[in-house]
């Protein structure tokens, strides 16, 4: 069989590696699809990651723009360029299964459209994308999202566009893989839902992939074993009081253990790395471009994770069922409904939603 994995985040790569190892008797092709923007973004995050996964996938294709010498295209031209690569690939090597962590991505939908021309019964498979899998798309009840956007997409792209009202909900998706199958959003429960094979994360092949990722970002794997508290931070713009919220959380963490046993994992797009390193010089600062997931198989069981409204909380509870996890409530009236839903969900996976003045 031939499987294609459309990857647009470190978490997608993490899961795609798991599934590729499970499908090791098949041909497994990774396709890296960074978000298309109007800004000249240069990044080598995925290229570096794929070097660590060379023995997991049969081959890989990346649309990552890794230097300024590479062409920068308009959104329309970039989509056209990507379609021009994907179409002959699927013509030459027809797909049996196509995996994605985001079925809204046009590259995935186009691939399903093309693949079905060359092989019957191509299976579209959704890989858990974190929060949206369980809470639903943030705009799923809006008129624009439900009616206007799908109409525009069909006019622009054609009848092959299948609107997903929430993650994993498009007609192209036949099966879902989820960390917590019983907790997925009700709107996708009508589809077959499978558990991701937890045991694969324990294999030497997967552990080796994680270790290579740490090496890429100069993270000493031996020091990971000494972490007592890991603070995983959302982008500072997410917090009403910005960087000060992050400072307060880390100060609270210092009440649990010595600073030298605290590790800080900042958001990949954080603009406060220098400030964090200056304000907390004795903490371990983990490269913010490194996917948080890569740390989990290596963390000691007695480590405490402090997060908030992020996929990190779910992933940690899933891969480290005995780990002590605290999700910090963000004081913001505009997010009251979100916290109500989060509290319900976090309760089901045994993660307390705590206030800053609570006993952690």
Image: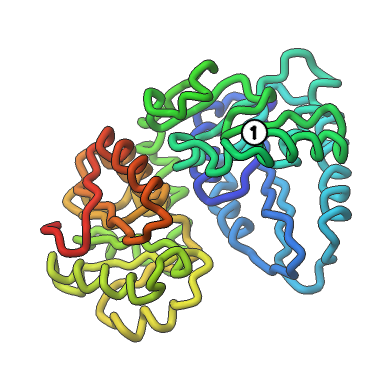
Residue at image position (62%, 44%) is: 7
Closest to the observer, 349 or 288? 349
The image shows residue 55, relative to residue 169, as above or below, that is: below
The image shows residue 250, relative to residue 180, as above or below, that is: below
The image shows residue 333, relative to residue 172, as above or below, that is: below
Q: Position of residue 281 (x, y in %)?
A: 29, 82
Please state if 107 lies on the left or on the right of 168 as rendered.
right
Query: Which residue is the site of mark 1?
Result: 28
Secondary structure under the numbered disc 1 in the rendered image: strand
Residue at image position (30%, 72%) is: 284
Q: Which quadrant holds residue 27?
A: top right
Q: Residues within 10 Å of mark 1 (few under 14, many from 20)?
A: many
Closest to the observer, 294 or 76? 76
Q: Position of residue 257 (x, y in %)?
A: 13, 67
Q: Position of residue 142 (x, y in %)?
A: 61, 40
Residue at image position (53%, 51%) is: 10
The image shows residue 132, relative to residue 231, as above or below, that is: above
Which of the image's four quarters has the N terminus?
top right
Please state if 181 lies on the left or on the right of 10 as rendered.
left
Residue at image position (84%, 20%) is: 118
Closest to the observer, 296 or 52? 296
Please state if 41 lies on the left or on the right of 216 as rendered.
right
Which of the image's four quarters has the C terminus?
bottom left
Would residue 5 be visible to someone looking at this image?
no
Q: Residue furthest top?
A: 120
Q: Which quadrant holds residue 279?
A: bottom left
The type of colouring in the image is: rainbow
Please state if 79 lies on the left or on the right of 98 as rendered.
right
Q: Position of residue 65 (x, y in %)?
A: 73, 63
Would residue 309 be visible to someone looking at this image?
yes
């Amino acid at each position: 069989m031939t499987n294609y994995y459309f990857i647009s985040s470190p978490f997608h790569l993490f899961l795609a590696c798991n599934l590729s190892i499970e499908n090791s008797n098949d041909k497994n092709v990774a396709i890296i699809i960074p978000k298309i923007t109007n800004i000249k973004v240069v990044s080598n995050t995925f290229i570096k990651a794929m070097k660590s996964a060379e023995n997991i996938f049969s081959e890989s294709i990346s649309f990552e723009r890794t230097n300024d010498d590479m062409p920068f295209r308009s959104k329309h031209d970039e989509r056209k360029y990507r379609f021009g690569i994907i179409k002959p690939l699927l013509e030459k090597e027809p797909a049996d299964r196509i995996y994605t962590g985001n079925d809204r991505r046009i590259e995935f939908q186009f691939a399903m459209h093309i693949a079905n021309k060359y092989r019957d019964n191509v299976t579209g498979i959704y890989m858990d994308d974190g929060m949206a899998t369980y809470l639903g798309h943030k705009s799923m009840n809006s008129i624009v999202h439900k009616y206007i956007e799908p109409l525009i997409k069909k006019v622009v792209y054609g009848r092959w566009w299948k609107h997903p009202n929430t993650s994993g909900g498009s007609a192209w998706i036949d099966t879902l893989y989820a960390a917590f199958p019983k907790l997925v959003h009700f709107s996708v429960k009508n589809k077959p839902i499978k558990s991701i094979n937890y045991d694969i994360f324990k294999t030497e092949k997967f552990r080796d992939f994680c270790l290579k990722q740490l090496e890429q970002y100069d993270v000493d794997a031996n020091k990971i074993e000494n972490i007592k508290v890991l603070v995983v931070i959302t982008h500072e713009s997410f917090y009403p009081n910005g960087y000060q919220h992050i400072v307060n959380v880390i100060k609270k963490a210092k009440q649990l253990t010595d600073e030298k046993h605290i590790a800080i994992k900042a958001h990949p797009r954080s603009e406060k790395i220098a400030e964090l390193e200056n304000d907390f010089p004795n903490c371990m600062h983990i490269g913010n471009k490194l996917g948080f997931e890569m740390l989990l198989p290596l963390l000691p069981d007695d480590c405490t994770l402090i997060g908030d409204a992020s996929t990190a909380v779910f992933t940690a509870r899933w891969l480290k069922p005995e780990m002590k996890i605290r999700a910090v409530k963000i004081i913001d009236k505009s997010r009251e409904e979100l916290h109500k839903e989060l509290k319900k969900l976090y309760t089901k996976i045994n993660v307390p939603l705590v206030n800053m003045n609570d006993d952690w």
